[in-house]
Amino acid sequence: MNFMRIRFKYSAIIIFIAAMNLFAFRDPLRGEIEHIIGSINGKVGVAVMGVEEGDTLTVNGLSRYPMQSVFKFPLAISVLNQVDKKKLSLEQKIHISKSDLLPNTWSPLRDKYPDGNVDITLDELLKFTVAQSDNNGCDILFRLMGGPKKVGKYIHSLGIKDISIVATEEEMHKDWSVQYRNFSSPAAMAKLLYKFYTGNILSEKSREYLYQVMVSTSTGPGRLKGALPEGTVVAHKTGSSGENEKGIAAATNDVGIVTLPNGKHFIIAVFVSDSGADEKTRDAVIAKITKAVWFGFLKR
């Protein structure tokens, strides 16, 4: 009995120390993030997860924010799920017509193939859509998948409920208000990133494929990566609304998986919404928050 009591007391001490370490990590970091958020007008939501330790922290993490192109990440997951099921193939050819390449929208795909009437692989189309955030490529993939609502239904089937995908890029461009219907909470997006990186929602081959595509993302260099040491590996997906006639940006977002120097990882989702600050300032808020989280994990 004495041995059992000693073991129980020892276990309780270990749990207590672990809890104290968690609070020592979380509370100062929360305060720092809240201070950074207070420097900008608009709404800011943050969710953080330590991949290896499972630490979590959110600030306004359950509020809903327009995703904009962040929704191309769950879209890519749904496409690769079909690849894993052998219903699609990365090598299959997708026909791109002139009518697919809408003007007045961000589209490196259109810049490369201005006249359309070309067959490209699904692999190339995914890379345009995710790594370069191509809007025309996004809507071509939505049509391939049967529409945004089917993609949203699949994401919900993974146990991620607080993400809504109901409208295409074209529909968002026609009506400013529509983007608010494509929403996510930071906590839900962080959970999806965690499931993607650590779970079995995709095959290992497809998981590694999408991870490397996200590492090659060229958009938003001043956001998650903006204040981190040069060469830091960040697999991420940005989302940007631009500004309306009043100078308000509905969405300046970046979500991703960051690799620390010790080989561990943290997941972070930052959404900045309805802000009148300029783009450089909005990007800097995301960069400062990510830097704070980076050092918070390194100090643990």
Image: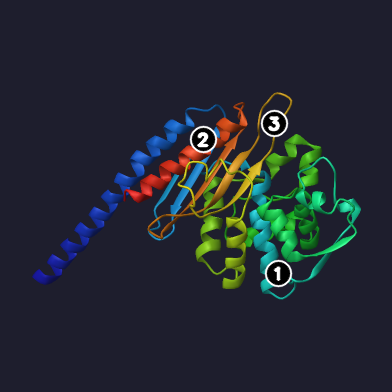
Q: Nearer the viewer, residue 290 or 17?
A: 290
SS label for mark 1: helix
Q: Tell me if mark 1 has few (under 14), some (14-19) or many (20+) residues whose alpha carbon lies within 10 angstroms of its own.
A: some
The amino acid pointed to by label 3 is: Glu
Which residue is under mark 1? 82
Q: In this view, does 129 lie to the left or right of 254?
A: right
Residue 164 in the image: above or below residue 122: above
Q: Which amino acid does label 1 sit on?
A: Gln
Q: Residue 64 carries which label?
A: none
Q: Classify residue 17 as left or right of residue 264.
A: left
Where residue 200 appears, as percent x and y from the top left, is 55, 69
The quarter of the picture where the N terminus appears is bottom left
Residue in the image at 62% along x and 59% along y? 213
Q: x, y percentage for residue 88?
A: 75, 71
Q: Disc 2 versus disc 3: distance between alpha carbons? A: 17 Å
Which residue was labeled with disc 3?
Answer: 243
* In-front residue for pair 66/251: 251
Res 280 visible:
yes
Horizontal and vertical percent for residue 27?
Answer: 34, 41
- Residue indicated by mark 2: 285
Name the residue furthest top: 246
Q: Which callout, 1 or 3, points to the residue nearer the camera?
A: 3
